[in-house]
Amino acid sequence: MIALIAWRTLTHDRTRFAVTLIGIVFSVVLVGMQVGLLLNFINTTSIIPTSSQADIFVTAPGVSSAEISTPQNERRRYQVLGVPGVAVAESYIVDFTFWKRPNGVRESVILIGVAPGASMGLPWLLEGDVDGRRLLEFPDGVIVDRLYFEKLGVTGTGEMFEINGVRARVVGFTKGVRTFVQSPYIFTSLANARRMMGMGDKHISYVLVKAEPGVAIAKLVADIQAHIPDSTVRTTRDFAHGSSYYWLFTTGAGASLIISAVLGILVGCVVVTQTLYANTIDRLPEYATLRAIGGGPGYLYSIVIGQAALAALIGYLIGIAIVLVLVYLGRDASASPVMPPWLMGALAVNTFAVCLIAATVSLGRLNRIDPAQVFK
Amino acid sequence: MSLLVAEALSHTYGSGDLAIPALHEIDLGIQPGEVTLLTGPSGSGKTTLIQIMGCLLRPSAGRVMLDGHDISRESEKKRNRTRRENFGFIFQANNLFPMLTAIENVMVALDVVGRETKARAKERAAELLAAVGLGERLTAFPANMSGGQRQRVGIARALAGDPRIILADEPTAALDALNGHRVVTLLRDLAHEKGRAVVIVTHDPRIEDLADRIVHIEDGQIAVDGRKNGT
Ligand SMILES: Nc1ncnc2c1ncn2[C@@H]1O[C@H](COP(=O)(O)OP(=O)(O)OP(=O)(O)O)[C@@H](O)[C@H]1O
Ligand SMILES: [Mg+2]
């Protein structure tokens, strides 16, 4: 009976119901897209460490983001190899540089150099059944991502371009290696990278470390740090978090995404509060009657909470459907939101919480109902 | 034997300079099986009296006895239960949910008083509506019913908890003579045939013929208390 009253009260005034749903749907879509974008941003800003399969990153001091490296000497790698517990230590180059399209237009790119024989930091999401190590063996060879064909002026393999004035040949593709700074990742060998960047042959950006089986990573980090005090040693996870944090909070991108999400929550809350309150005020004499005939306050609360829950349910279902369509449509965009199941669940919980919070104002009003007023 | 008894009941709204005296030391016993009319000029305290006797308002002084207990001093929770188990209320504005049908409005009351199982509730609501002559209008919405029909839905709802005492405030004020007569006849039958105690506050001289007892109130006090057959 309570569900019936809740449903009929909620839908009695069609216009009001429509406005309520629009408010909740707007809120779900806004919050969903913003958090989805935020998540994508966090994923892409930490993609270099998280895709590397390394346990530990050794960087020059003060490096806070994987994209913005400070050069180190390859001697570091041998120092790291001397620390007990280190199974593999490999050199890695990550740096911004310029790509020149055939028409002369320059585009900023992030060049990633990795030794062809490496076990960590190899190109991920390679397209087709190819061996990334073989592609890296080509002199001049570079691997680009399909998402950025247009931006880089690439149409297929074998095409020649210039990176920082040095010849480069497209030898393979990745599919879906997204960047967040509009500078696509270009994979090549360590030697190519050094040549293209005009660096000495001892130059590296990072040492990627794999621990021996059974070695505690935290302990190994401390040991390497003690051994090489003039570097910064972090677990891959810490470096990933650090990178995300850097881009989120030094650029303001994070703040604006978070503010939009909070705004979405507020809009939903205000709209639902208004509707539930208006619905409650409209039915005060009936509610007073229920109190007079012996209904407890809980009975009235359930009617309002029922309305909040129904509005949340319908609004969420429509909202999440729209979000999923938008995520699907934007799947190839460079900043496409991600929507893992846990986030959909979190959005559902958030929507219900917002609607329940919105109900509290009405509950307060119901609490003040005087059943004696039925005889006025 | 009185079922519901007011003893030295006084009530004042507000306090200090703003105090409005509404009732002054009223003694009144309500009998089962009869219709008691409360009459009196506007502002004389009739509504205040049935609010207090119906456990909806606490008196400033005095007691209201039901089954040997003073129900006016019980906790809110107990008073809620006392209303649920003993009282049926009928008012001028019948306060039906506009988005529920006649039978659904009665079913809500059955749900609140918790007397029937879910399965039985629909059947019982239909019985209650049939008893007030609305067996054919079960699925009508209040907006599509006449004032008299709505008032009768209100009566069916008031009877959901099978109350021993029915308190009605101006139940005929919004009705024409025919419908008014019909509603009061219904209430009289409940008193005479089912032994309920029925109290009706009214300004309506047309229904005085149907009463067993008329209590006239003036300035918060009982001015006249007369029975038809002079007991
Ligand atoms: N909630 C209230 N607050 C303050 N004064 C009130 C309140 N309710 C009633 N009164 C006052 O108490 C007195 C008795 O009012 P009550 O409503 O009981 O009279 P009544 O006999 O029912 O009148 P009517 O025939 O007009 O309905 C009146 O002076 C009225 O103004
Ligand atoms: Mg009155």
Image (cartoon, coloured by chain):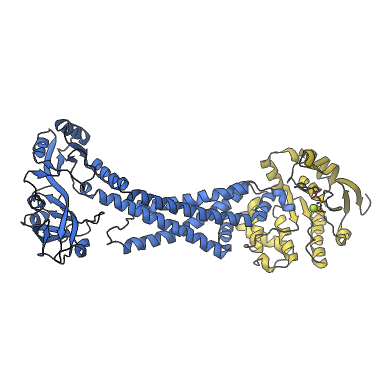
| Residue B227 vertical position relative to residue B16 in the rendered view, above or below | below
Residue at left offset 49%, top offset 52%: A269
Q: Is residue B215 left or right of residue A310?
A: right
Farthest residue to the top: give it. A226
Q: Is residue A303 above or below residue A87?
A: below
x and y percent of residue B120 in the render?
A: 63, 57
Q: Position of residue A238 (x, y in %)?
A: 25, 40
Q: Image quarter for residue A216?
A: top left
- In the rendered image, the quadrant that contains the N terminus of chain B is top right
Q: Colour of chain B?
A: yellow
Q: Quadrant of residue A149?
A: bottom left
Q: Residue at x 72, y 55 (%)?
A: B158
Frontmost residue, A368 versus A183: A183
Please, is residue B11 above or below residue A161 in the view? above
The x and y percentages for residue B115 are 66, 51
Q: Quadrant of residue A236?
A: top left
Q: Is residue A181 visible?
A: yes
What is the drawing colour of chain A? Answer: blue
Which one is nearer the viewer's eye here, B70 or A97? A97
Q: Residue furthest right?
A: B230
